[in-house]
Image: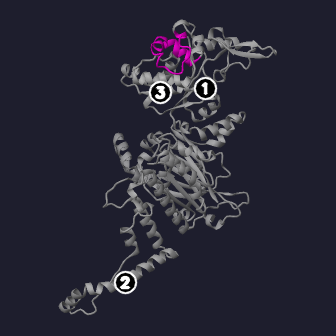
């Protein structure tokens, strides 16, 4: 038995949102403000009977609420949470009998509706006679007083195509109590606000010690404490007896005086140590070896956060076991809080083993951490994305695999890249793909210069350096990301080389494509350009010449609206074939002036004699990484102002908007 699907309507950005759950862990990820926390808050509101407010309703339906009248279809404005539960013949059907409305052998699903609706008649009566402007103010301030939460069992299996089922077939909804649901489903939440801090205040109870105390007390309060708890209580009782023997001589004079003054007999001082109080006031979490023990607050925040999470999970496990529900749902919000990348990796690597020890458990984890994502199973990922003022939750692995059905090798590469290299693409607002090491080292410098120039001219300009942009080196594999970028709908700039070649015939009679200056080229060996700019399939195609002319003129557009391809164009009467050639042609004088300290060059004498930039670049570049590092060093330490190639400037301008 498990929760297979959760649907949400009319709650904040969750206008019409569906989540398909895994049987064990579902990892909810997405950019900021995509509804991850709202998802958690909604569950809390319904399961803990918390009050909803006006601002919990989506902006898109507030005008209808503000202008409510007798004709308003009020059921369409309700906040709804629908939980679908799948079961089979091996499950205990007694626990879901309250929700089984069809006993047919083919029916293996029950559905529960939580609904927060507006009591229209009461609200209309209250605002009758109020001026329109005042009506809106009243509704905004007081709507919570006219909201009522109800729970229903329903079966829409015969009306799956009906979009207004809860309005058209309202008479088929069977009212239920919250107790009916909580007897079936136990929801526990570990919030991101975990009060983990490194305070050294000796008078305050540290978070871990507080949590261990709560954990001990919950076990001690159990109707059937385990043997370890009983052993602690026995030790405390024995301590009471021994202390009483020591109390008698200490309090002998006091007791005698009390008896004489007040004529009280059999007055004694008894020891009454409570294990709960003893644990609460005299325990702490420490770490270290032998005599080298350090207190909790000297742990780093990352360690404290992981320890706190583990203790919280253990406490939730006790609650699950105590209530013994058929479905346990644990929600962990942003486990990466306060935690450095290594600890995030440790969490992702080990969390499943910890959670697998809890029976009947499904877990929802929200995260902004690329480290957690990259070390997780991609089949667990649910990607949240805002489209048309509504949050869509995409089943990452299943949906993307379908998109790559004709390119399985690209999908395999993508999985491996995201797992090994970087999963930050999931959280980026924009992406810049670069091809080689030279661009990777120098692009941050170009961005800095671009920001500096634009900030001078436009005071409202938002620097690229402050935007959420991921810069990734992908070599010649950019096309493997195309469907992934489409899936995430991320604005992407691809900086690459025009890589012109001249078709020739080898001695064996085979066609070969030899690198050549742009002016001599008829073809490009760059698969990224051919793919994104939609070239004819073969050089021999009749449309190839026209397409290649468009490539040279930079008049082609990407077949993907949200992706721009930036490559070398004619600048200062020269059309470079590669980044290095474009950079050298623009900065030849400064390179000559600094040739003694620029590494990665050979045949430096060519700088003074060779005016053919294509030939010069091929002759003098020895090691690209050393060359780029030297250029960067001169810019940062000597304030050398390198010129940025125009095609890169245009690309940066495009991704700014």
Left or right of 303 on screen, residue 621 = right
At horizontal 58% and vertical 63% (from top left) the residue drawn is 184
Q: Position of residue 295 (x, y in %)?
A: 39, 59
Q: Which mark is residue 242?
A: 2
Estimate the x, y position of residue 85 in percent, counting from the top left: 62, 56
- Mark nearest the camera among 3 and 1 is 3
Residues at circles 3 and 1 in contact by the CB criterion of under 8 Å:
no
Alpha-carbon span between mark 1 and mark 2: 82 Å
Q: Nearer the viewer, mark 1 or mark 2?
A: 2
| Disc 3 to disc 2, C-alpha distance | 72 Å
From the image, which quarter does the N terminus lie in?
A: bottom right
> Which residue is nearer to you in this view: 501 or 7?
501
Q: Secondary structure at mark 3?
A: helix
Mark 1 and mark 2 residues within 8 Å of each other at the beta carbon: no
**Label 1 packing within 10 angstroms: few (<14), some (14-19), many (20+):** some
**Nearest the eye: 448 or 28:** 448
- Find the residue positioned furthest to the left: 261
Verify whether residue 594 appears in magenta: yes
Q: Quadrant of residue 406?
A: top right
Is residue 340 positioned above or below 595 on the image? below
What residue is rendered at 56% in x and 19% in y? 579
Question: Which residue is denoted by mark 1 in the rendering?
Answer: 560
**416 versus 339 height, above or below:** above
Relative to residue 263, is residue 549 drawn left or right? right
Q: Is residue 89 above or below residue 388?
A: below
Is residue 201 among what the camera can see? yes
Please state the extent of the stretch shown in magenta in the rendering: 578-607
Please name the residue shown 48% across and 54% down the image.
306
Compare residues 388 and 209 and report the one nearer the observer.
Answer: 209
Q: Which residue is mark 3?
A: 444
Determine whether the residue tagged by mark 2 lies in a helix, strand or loop: helix
């Amino acid at each position: 038995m498990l929760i297979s699907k959760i649907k949400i309507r009319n709650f904040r950005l969750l206008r019409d949102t569906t989540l398909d759950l895994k049987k064990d862990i579902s990892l909810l990820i997405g950019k900021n403000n995509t509804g991850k926390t709202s998802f958690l808050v909604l569950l809390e509101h319904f399961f803990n009977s918390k009050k909803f407010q006006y601002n919990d309703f989506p902006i898109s339906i507030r005008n209808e609420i503000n202008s409510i009248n007798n004709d308003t279809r009020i059921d369409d404005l309700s906040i709804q949470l629908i939980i679908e539960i799948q079961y089979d013949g091996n499950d205990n059907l007694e626990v879901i009998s309250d929700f089984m409305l069809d006993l047919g052998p083919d029916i293996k699903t029950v559905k529960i509706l939580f609904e927060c609706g507006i009591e229209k008649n009461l609200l209309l009566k209250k605002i009758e006679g109020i001026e329109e402007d005042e009506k809106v103010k009243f509704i905004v301030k007081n709507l919570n007083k006219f909201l009522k939460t109800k729970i229903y069992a329903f079966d829409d299996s015969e009306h799956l195509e009906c979009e207004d089922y809860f309005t058209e077939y309202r008479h088929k909804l069977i009212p239920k109590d919250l107790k009916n649901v909580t007897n079936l489903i136990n929801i526990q939440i570990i919030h991101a606000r975990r009060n983990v801090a490194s305070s050294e205040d000796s008078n305050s109870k540290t978070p871990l010690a507080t949590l261990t105390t709560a954990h001990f007390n919950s076990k001690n309060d159990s109707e059937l404490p385990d043997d370890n708890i009983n052993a602690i209580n026995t030790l405390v009782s024995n301590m009471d007896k021994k202390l009483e023997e020591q109390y008698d001589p200490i309090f002998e004079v006091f007791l005698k005086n009390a008896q004489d003054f007040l004529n009280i007999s059999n007055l004694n001082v008894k020891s009454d140590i409570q294990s709960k109080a003893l644990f609460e006031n005299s325990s702490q979490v420490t770490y270290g070896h032998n005599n080298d023990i350090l207190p909790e607050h000297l742990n780093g925040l990352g360690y404290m956060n992981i320890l706190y999470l583990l203790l919280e999970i253990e406490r939730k496990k006790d609650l699950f076991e105590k209530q013994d529900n058929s479905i346990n749902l644990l929600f962990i919000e942003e486990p990466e809080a306060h935690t450095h990348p290594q600890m995030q990796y440790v969490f992702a690597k080990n969390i499943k083993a910890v959670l697998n020890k809890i029976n009947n458990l499904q877990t929802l984890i929200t995260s902004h951490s690329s480290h957690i994502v990259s070390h997780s199973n991609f089949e667990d990922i649910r990607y949240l994305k805002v489209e048309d003022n509504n949050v869509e939750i995409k089943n990452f692995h299943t949906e993307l695999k379908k998109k790559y059905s004709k390119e399985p090798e690209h999908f395999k590469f993508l999985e491996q890249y995201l797992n090994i290299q970087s999963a930050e693409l999931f959280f980026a607002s924009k992406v810049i793909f670069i091809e080689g090491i030279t661009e990777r080292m120098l692009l941050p410098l170009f961005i800095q210069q671009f920001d500096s120039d634009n900030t001078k001219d436009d005071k409202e300009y938002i620097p690229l350096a402050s935007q959420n942009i991921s810069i990734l080196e992908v070599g010649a594999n950019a096309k493997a990301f195309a469907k992934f970028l489409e899936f995430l709908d991320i604005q992407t700039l691809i900086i690459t080389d025009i890589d012109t070649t001249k078709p020739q015939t080898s001695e064996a009679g085979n066609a070969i494509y030899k690198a050549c200056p742009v002016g001599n080229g008829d073809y490009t060996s760059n698969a990224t350009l051919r793919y994104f700019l939609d070239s004819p399939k073969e050089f021999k195609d009749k449309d190839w010449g026209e397409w290649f002319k468009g490539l040279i003129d930079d008049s082609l557009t990407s077949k993907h609206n949200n992706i721009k391809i930036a490559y070398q164009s004619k600048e200062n009467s020269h059309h470079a074939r590669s980044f290095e050639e474009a950079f050298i042609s623009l900065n030849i004088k400064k390179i000559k002036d600094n040739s003694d300290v620029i590494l990665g060059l050979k045949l430096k004498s060519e700088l003074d004699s060779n005016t053919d930039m294509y030939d010069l670049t091929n002759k003098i570049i020895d090691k690209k990484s050393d060359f780029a590092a030297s250029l960067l060093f001169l810019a940062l330490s000597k304030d050398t102002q390198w010129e940025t190639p125009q095609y890169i400037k245009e690309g940066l301008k495009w991704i700014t908007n």
